[in-house]
Amino acid sequence: MQPTAKPRNPNFSSGPCSKRPGYDVSALQLNTLGRSHRSTPGKKALGLACSETARLLGLPEGYRVGVVPGSDTGAVEMALWSLLGQRGVDVLAWESFGSGWATDVVKQLKLTDARVLKADYGEIVDLAQVDFARDVVFTWNGTTSGVKVPNGDWIPASRSGLTICDATSAVFAMDIPWDKLDVATFSWQKVLGGEGAHGMLILGPRAAARLESYSPPWPLPKVFRLTSGGKISEGIFRGETINTPSMLCVADYLDALQWLEGIGGVPAAIARSQANLAVIADFVASHDWISFLARDPATRSNTSVCLTLDLDAERVKKMVKLLEGEAVAYDIGSYRDAPPGIRIWCGATVETSDVEALMPWLAWAYGQAAA
């Protein structure tokens, strides 16, 4: 039978992700709107976006945080184009975004000493094969496959190369050992449900040293330049952005950070996300027509939860349309490059009660699509 109770918030998209519970745009601090981002209040707000991120994440001493153009993609590419080329590089790919970084390294930067370690959707590469005498580029959580690295134990504390991590759907939702990452990137529209267009670049001391001791042989566009006169442009990490940001988006991000602190910080956000995953895991365990794309529980994402069904692609699309038509779940079809299935965002801004309300609807829509 068709369920009656619906999720109060049907936004389960994996990006832009659901706004925080109780979100109200009228509550934002909007004194920076219509002001220059280089005005005193503009620079203060941007500076807070950097410093509050560092504080709430508990970043080690000497780590810098900057707001950069182009969302997470811009932040990753800024790191790749600015830092790579001094030594060989291993690029790890088990879904579309990791594959995209491999394309950048091999086809755009044309690095000759590049290894691409690749795994199919649902799997992860053999992390024991990674060579940390080289630079290493990887995603912490594969947003389009629902496969994450199990932990940071595979990354040695003493390494010669840099670790460059796309962490956009993991930051604020997974336990990340920051000292194992020399570069990390994310975007506001993921785990905290912020707005798009802006990226966050986290640089550790080893990456900073590389920037000041190595100049890549290719020209760098202005939006990628992190140094001036051979020294790091420190203003970037105090909120002096390379290009003009949206101050409305900045206010929205600061609101999300305030909410994060109010619920108990990163540990509470991780717990909320894991509780959401647990609801789906219980549902999958009791229904034989649905499975996790990530086969190994140790590498199963607790944010971008990817599921496969015993339906063909057209019936999966029908199921997704039924759920959207009933205003039960929006934007949960799998990523265009991924195997047919559904993807449910389970980050901290999603209420567990909404995930619980969605489960009977999945069973109903499956029955309708399979008939």
Image: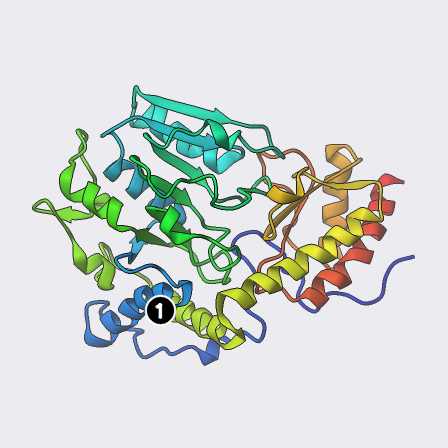
Q: Quadrant of the N terminus?
A: bottom right
Task: Work out whether 16 lies above or below 38.
Answer: above
Q: Position of residue 288 (x, y in %)?
A: 84, 41
> Does residue 267 appear left or right of residue 371 in this picture?
left
Residue 35 in sight here: no
* Mark 1 element type: helix
Locate residue 272, reporting x and y percent: 61, 64
The quadrant in which the C terminus is found is top right
* Residue 371 visible in the shown view: yes
Residue 80 in percent (x, y) is at 31, 37
Of residues 46 and 70, the one nearer the viewer is 46
Q: Residue at x 41, y 67 (%)?
A: 56
Closer-to-camera residue (223/270): 270
Judge left or right: residue 291 versus residue 199: right
Disc 1 marks a residue whose amino acid type is Glu
The residue most toward the front is 158
In the picture shown, does residue 61 fall above or below 285?
A: below
Name the residue: 18% across, 60% down: 235
- Of residues 212 and 6, the one nearer the viewer is 212
- The residue lying at 77 percent from left, 45 percent from top is 319
Residue at 79 percent of width and 35 percent of height: 311
Is 209 displayed left or right of 254 in the figure? left
Residue, disc 1: 52
